[in-house]
Amino acid sequence: MKFPAIGDIASTSIISINIEESVLSAMELMLEHEHRNIVVVNKNTFYIFTILDVLNIQNLEIALESSLSVLNLSKIPTINRDRNVLDTLSYLNNEIEFICVLDRDNSLYGLVTHSDITLNIDPDTLMDNFRLADFLKIGRQMKCVNKEEKTSKILNEMIHNSFDNVVVVEDLKPLGILTTKDIMCLIKGKSDLSLSIETYMSAPVDSIHKNASIKEALSFITKKHYKRVIVVDDKGKLSGIVTQKELISLTYSRWAVLMQEYQKELSEINNMLEHKNKEYETMASTDSLTGLYNRHKFTELYVTSYKSMLQRESELSLIMLDIDFFKRVNDTYGHNIGDDVLVQISHSLLKVLRNVDIVCRWGGEEFVVLLPSTSLETATILAEKIRLYIKELELDRVGSISVSLGVCSIHSGEKLEESIDRADKALYLAKHSGRDCVKTELEI
């Protein structure tokens, strides 16, 4: 098996413009060709003009007739068309999601993006048992807003937080989306930004169910030409998003297996693989916000710990933790402060727990802790210690916060879902007993 050269997968139908041309000319080209971005050429140096640049122009009140040279555009890295596609991975892991592909005479040949990488991953190499629900990251790569919010407020938040689009929701159900094309049209047309975001959003929204496989998500993104996919639950409510970059990282391990079957190819890229494999393994097993294990990795570690419990005839316990009134924190202080709270709670758990304990961000504001060689009684004492430690914290802006905890022991012959269900019922009891307390399965 030979991986393709970069020139074989590069998009050669790119739109470019000279740096001395006007901002308005660049926007018109983007609208005409329905491109989210345009390459700006300055002799042998290349830049990218994106929707975020358009927003900054609006914010800084730069005249649309101004030359592109006055803007602080991001420089695009370059790579020769004869290089192997694997050489693009280190580039695409950075913030800049584009690489200019140069011809043999160093002229502009094309552009490589996440889409080009995705299109060259064989979906049959993906494991169908990977589900989107295990990898959701709500509110991180895409902003979620209510339909009544003012457009001007949303655009300012997009500038400050580097969002390139927003999802408009009502009761957490996606109603529409404000895309790069929508933003350019309303700025170019000098639209009234005091109106609600509902006025300018595109509707309806394409989405995919959270139980869809990675293979199905990849096919969906490829067919729709999207950078990310909006994920909903059984009730059609927003569950989160998954980006192209995340799909690439999940499939990279499968690439490594295929390459091991071809020794000549492996000998040429072995050093790079060793480094990249560790990098992508970490991406696929940890939560990007807190650095804790994600649900998929926790499930793997649970199986190992469960087998060890049976072999050693030891005990194994589980704690489920939920931050009290966390929605109030997000609503009062904003999602950025909410994220900071999640990170601080994660650090607190790592300080209180032992090195052998396994800590996972289960989803949203919920955390799960697996305690090897620990009885229900000891786990309950530890849960109380966690509760008191967190309650005594002085969090930035928020002040103090409390948590509720449910504790259960792991029984021989049961699956993880059954253990989680009992811990969740204990947590539910804690929530309905006034919160800020610990309950065990014995009290259910």
Image (cartoon, rainbow, N blue to C red):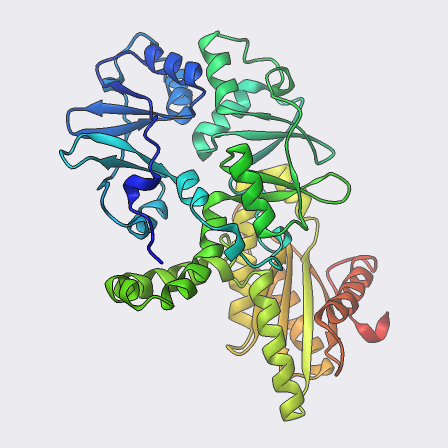
Extreme residue toward the front, this view: 1
378 w.r.t. 151: above or below = below
| Identity of the residue drawn at 52% across and 8% down | 191
Which part of the image, by quadrant, shows the C terminus? bottom right
| Identity of the residue drawn at 73% across and 67% down | 417
Direction from residue 229 to residue 95 in the image, left or right: left
Res 149 seen here: yes
Number of marks in the rendered image: 0
Q: Nearer the viewer, residue 328 or 359?
A: 359
Q: Nearer the viewer, residue 67 or 342?
A: 67
132 w.r.t. 406: above or below = above
Direction from residue 19 to residue 349 in the image, left or right: right
Residue 279 drawn at (x, y percent): 38, 60
Which part of the image, by quadrant, shows the N terminus? bottom left
Extreme residue toward the bottom, this view: 312
Residue 382 drawn at (x, y percent): 65, 75
Q: Where is residue 6, by image quadrant?
A: top left
Residue 364 drawn at (x, y percent): 63, 51
Extreme residue toward the left, this view: 105
Extreme residue toward the right, this view: 444
Q: Where is residue 193, by image quadrant?
A: top right
| Identity of the residue drawn at 67% across and 88% down | 310
| Identity of the residue drawn at 67% across and 30% down | 169
Q: Nearer the viewer, residue 367 or 199?
A: 199
Res 392 seen here: no
Residue 77 drawn at (x, y percent): 25, 39
